[in-house]
Image: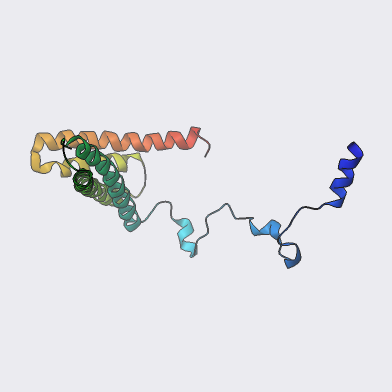
């Protein structure tokens, strides 16, 4: 029985679609591990530019706010449905509520990201280094500016919450980099 399996292995071969093309398939997927940069000046940069920073934070903020707000609005629309409504009317209520709340949350969190990115980029420029202090001060300023119209007490509380949140996020990122192999 063992002889027949050995004979069978010798008479068959594995299918190789690139066999006759003379393509070095081993090197085809051998990708570099270092970043590929278009200009050599980009290699010396240690952080994103202010424009990239603003685009990243505002975009992530808007997207996450829109998803969270849309989910919250959808649940509110489902709860607001009344007995006797047709399916078409219920669906319209859910979609309107989800879209309105998602848009509102997305805009609010996107503006927070925009303010944070501007303050953080300004701090990096003025201090000349990129560290935890920049993010904490940017979070403090973001909270204070966002709630400034509500009065000084509200702005101070929001600033403290923003500073602590930003510092915790950056510290958590550093802990993850150090202890979680990704």
Residue at the far bottom: name it.
Answer: 21
Q: Residue at x 17, y 41 (%)?
A: 85
Quadrant that contains the N terminus = top right
Q: Residue at x 17, y 44 (%)?
A: 146
> Is 51 positioned to the left or the right of 37 in the image?
left
Give residue 150's position: percent from left, percent from top.
9, 40
Colour scheme of the rendered structure: rainbow
Give residue 115's position: percent from left, percent from top.
23, 49
Give residue 34's position: percent from left, percent from top.
55, 53
Q: Residue at x 71, y 62 (%)?
A: 18
Give residue 80's position: percent from left, percent from top.
16, 37
In-front residue for pair 115/67: 67
In this rendering, is residue 48 above or below 39? above
Residue at the far right: name it.
Answer: 3
In this rendering, is residue 168 above or below 48? above
> Is 60 positioned to the left or the right of 93 in the image?
right
Q: Quadrant of residue 78?
A: top left
* Residue 140 seen by the camera: no
In-front residue for pair 121/82: 82
In-front residue for pair 159/27: 27
- State the count of labels: 0
* Residue 58 seen by the camera: yes
In-front residue for pair 42/165: 165
> Is 7 positioned to the left or the right of 16 in the image?
right
């Amino acid at each position: 029985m063992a002889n027949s399996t050995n004979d069978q292995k010798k008479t068959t071969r594995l299918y190789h679609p690139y066999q006759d093309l003379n393509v070095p398939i081993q090197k085809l997927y051998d990708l570099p591990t270092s970043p590929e940069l278009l200009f050599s000046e980009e290699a010396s940069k240690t952080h994103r530019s202010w424009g990239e920073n603003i685009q990243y934070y505002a975009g992530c903020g808007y997207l996450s706010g829109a998803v969270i707000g849309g989910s919250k609005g959808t649940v509110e629309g489902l709860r607001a449905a009344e007995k006797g409504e047709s399916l078409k009317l219920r669906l319209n209520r859910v979609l309107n509520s989800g879209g309105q709340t998602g848009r509102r949350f997305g805009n609010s969190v996107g503006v927070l990201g925009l303010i944070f990115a501007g303050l953080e980029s300004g701090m990096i420029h003025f201090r000349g280094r990129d560290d935890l202090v920049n993010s904490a001060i940017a979070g403090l300023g973001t909270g204070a500016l966002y709630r400034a119209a509500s009065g000084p007490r509200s702005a101070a509380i929001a600033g403290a919450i923003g500073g602590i949140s930003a510092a915790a996020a950056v510290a958590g990122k550093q802990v993850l980099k150090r202890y979680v192999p990704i």
